[in-house]
Image: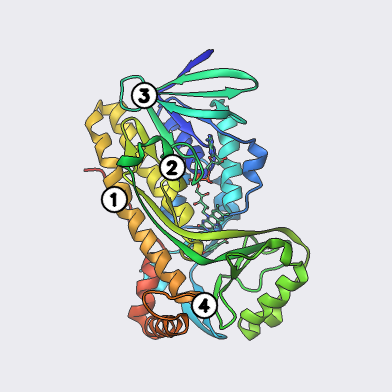
Amino acid sequence: MKTLKTQVAIVGAGPSGLLLGQLLARQGIDNIIVERVSGEYVLGRIRAGILEQGFVDLVREAGVAERMDSEGEVHNGFDIAVNGRSFHIDLKTLTGGKTVLCYGQTEITRDLMAARAAAGLETYYEASDVALHDLKTESPHLTFEQAGEAVRLDCDYIAGCDGFHGVSRRSIPEELRTEHERVYPFGWLGLLADTPPVAEELIYCKSERGFALASRRSSTRSRYYLQVSMTDDVENWSDEAFWEELKKRLPEEAAERLVTGPSLEKSIAPLRSFVCEPMQYGALFLVGDAAHIVPPTGAKGLNLAASDVSTLSRILQRVYQQNDRACVEQYSPIALRRVWHGERFSWWMSNLLHSFNGDEINGMDAATYNRFMHSELDYYLNSDEGRAVIARQYVGLPYEALH
Ligand code: FAS
Ligand code: PHB
């Protein structure tokens, strides 16, 4: 068996693992990433598009912001359209100057991968049978197979950045984990196309036919979503069927501007709210989707991963630079406070903007629940204070300092 050693072993080369690895390396903290699939496969996943300021600052701190700063689009607000009537959420005015950046997760991941390779930092792609061992001892380590060779990676700490279906969360004994979950009775059918977007900023659409989102990746590349049943299948949706349904859910003036074209990617993502508590166990820290999942309605998934990374990288800096090993206990409480705020906002926006049908919800039939949600959204959209409540959470709540 081949034996390796590092200070921090990172499981997963998605945005969480790559961003953490970059921040640690810049602080002189040695780390190795072990990833199950190839780098090309990671880049093939089309996911988030909106970055909070906290994320942007972290990417700049990581020294990987050049393309993001030149190609990313600053958004000062977005629209919420309710049955064709648009309400503008003026983020900049309502939050005293805060904005969000529109820049695809795929691009961030590409930039982080390039920076890691340029720095000569070790990443083991296409690693199989990754397992975590001795997490509550002085010799935590990983084992995995790569290119037919068995490998042991000795380390001080393990960052489980391996997403919802990873191995890290399951390495915390089940009796010590509390998992909170809400699976929504619908999913998002996403489509990516090289067509000019219908608007300069995002449009979240609530319609009798269901939710839709008009997003973008650049002035020539669009990203759209439609609420579909959780039992739906992407094979049921031709590009033409997608475009026709989107037109019916967009406000009229946006539908008239819609430019259609062949899809570059089309897939259905299930929607769930999920939190695992605690987010650490001995030498293991859970980061990003390994610990929590949000419905993408609040654009929080990737952004909550970033605040986990920020907290953990600051803690590990304190451990190695100030020899303060006790501070590791701060990770889970600090991370979970911000995670739950992001979960609540994403759950709230999902209930306000989607159409529920079928079974009972909160002790009432779906039609009655939809009426309550319609009235709640109407209340918040029709006052500055109400729109400010949405804006302050959408731009992202502050990151908590270490104690
Ligand atoms: P990731 O899942 O991105 O990365 C985990 C990595 O670990 C993967 O590369 C995986 O291959 C690897 N891995 C898994 N098991 C492993 C093992 N055993 N050993 C080694 N490696 C392993 N967020 C938004 O804000 N807006 C959106 O629109 C949005 N859309 C999404 C659509 C989908 C289908 C999904 C799944 C998520 C979406 N998200 C969205 C959330 C998404 O952006 C995540 O928050 C983000 O990818 C989190 O990054 P990571 O924590 O790095 O997890
Ligand atoms: C996206 O562009 O993929 C996107 C943007 C905002 C969201 C969800 C997804 O809330």
| Residue holding disc 4 | 357
Sequence-first disc among 1 and 2: 2
Q: Is residue 107 found left or right of 94 in the rendered image?
A: right
Q: Position of residue 39 (x, y in %)?
A: 63, 37
Sequence-first disc among 3 and 2: 2
Which circle, 1 or 2, is nearer the viewer? 1
Q: Three-letter amino acid code at disc 4?
A: Asn
* Residue 306, placed above or below residue 366: above
Sequence-first disc among 3 and 4: 3
| Residue holding disc 2 | 61
Label 2 packing within 10 angstroms: few (<14), some (14-19), many (20+):
few
Between the C-alphas of marks 3 and 2, the distance is 33 Å
Along the line of sight, the residue nearer the viewer: 311 or 346: 346
Which circle, 3 or 2, is nearer the viewer? 3
| Residue holding disc 1 | 400
| Residue labelled 1 has its Cβ within 8 Å of some atom of ligand 1 | no
